[in-house]
Image (cartoon, rainbow, N blue to C red):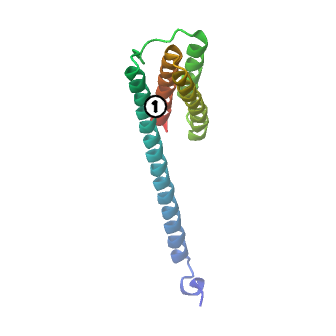
């Protein structure tokens, strides 16, 4: 005996479909929360990594002012472009694409720091930290919008 025979008006079928939609929506929301948690965790990890780099520099006797303004016009123009794009974009996939690019820049400057530090080129290492600070702030802005 099929459900249609017992429930000719389809009330049970509609209720079952409604329940499935609710479960699907709930699963999507929980995945979104999991993704946000992973992103927050990654953000904390990036912050800790940057702080460790600063401490390594300080142990070598170098003064690191991560808040010092960078005067490189190309970098400043790039940062402004990215921030404008983040402000204008409203949909998560586009923000995630921008975030992917920003993470690429963070990774690049992280490697640049490591190379400069190994070669004891502390000015280059400080520049890398400052740039990582700029890109890190953009990443934080993206995280708030996601």
Q: Which of 64 and 133 is in front in this view?
A: 64
Q: Is residue 145 above or below residue 12?
A: above
Residue occupying the point 50% across, 13% down:
123
Q: Is residue 11 above or below residue 112?
A: below
Residue 88 visible at all: no
User: How many neighbours does mark 1 have within 10 angstroms: few (below 14), some (14-19), or many (20 or more)?
Assistant: some
Taking 86 as reference, is 62 left or right?
left
Tell me where residue 101 appears, x and y as whole percent: 61, 31
Tell me where residue 78 appears, x and y as whole percent: 60, 18
Residue occupying the point 40% across, 29% down:
51
Q: Is mark 1 on a helix, strand or loop?
A: helix
Furthest residue toward bottom: 1
Tell me where residue 80 appears, x and y as whole percent: 55, 18
Q: How many marks?
A: 1
Tell me where residue 5 appears, x and y as whole percent: 58, 87
Residue 72 visible at all: yes
Q: Is residue 140 above or below residue 13?
A: above
Indicate the quadrant where residue 1 lies. Answer: bottom right
Q: Is residue 17 above or below residue 137?
A: below
Q: Nearer the viewer, residue 58 or 7?
A: 58
Q: Which of 136 and 118 is in front in this view?
A: 118
Name the residue tied to disc 1.
140
Residue occupying the point 47% across, 30% down:
141
Indicate the quadrant where residue 85 lies. Answer: top right
């Amino acid at each position: 005996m099929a459900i249609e025979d017992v429930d000719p008006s389809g009330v049970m079928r509609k209720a079952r479909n409604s329940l499935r939609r609710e479960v699907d929506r709930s699963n999507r929301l929980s995945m979104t929360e999991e993704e946000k948690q992973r992103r927050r965790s990654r953000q904390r990890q990036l912050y800790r990594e940057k702080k460790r780099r600063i401490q390594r520099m300080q142990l070598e006797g170098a003064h690191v002012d991560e808040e010092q303004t960078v005067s490189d016009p190309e970098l400043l123009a790039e940062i402004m472009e990215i921030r404008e794009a983040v402000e204008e974009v409203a949909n998560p996939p586009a923000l995630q694409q921008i975030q992917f690019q920003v993470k690429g820049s963070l990774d690049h400057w992280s490697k640049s720091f490591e190379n400069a530090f190994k070669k004891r080129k502390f000015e280059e290492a400080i520049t890398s930290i400052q740039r990582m600070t700029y890109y890190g702030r953009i990443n934080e802005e993206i995280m708030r919008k996601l």
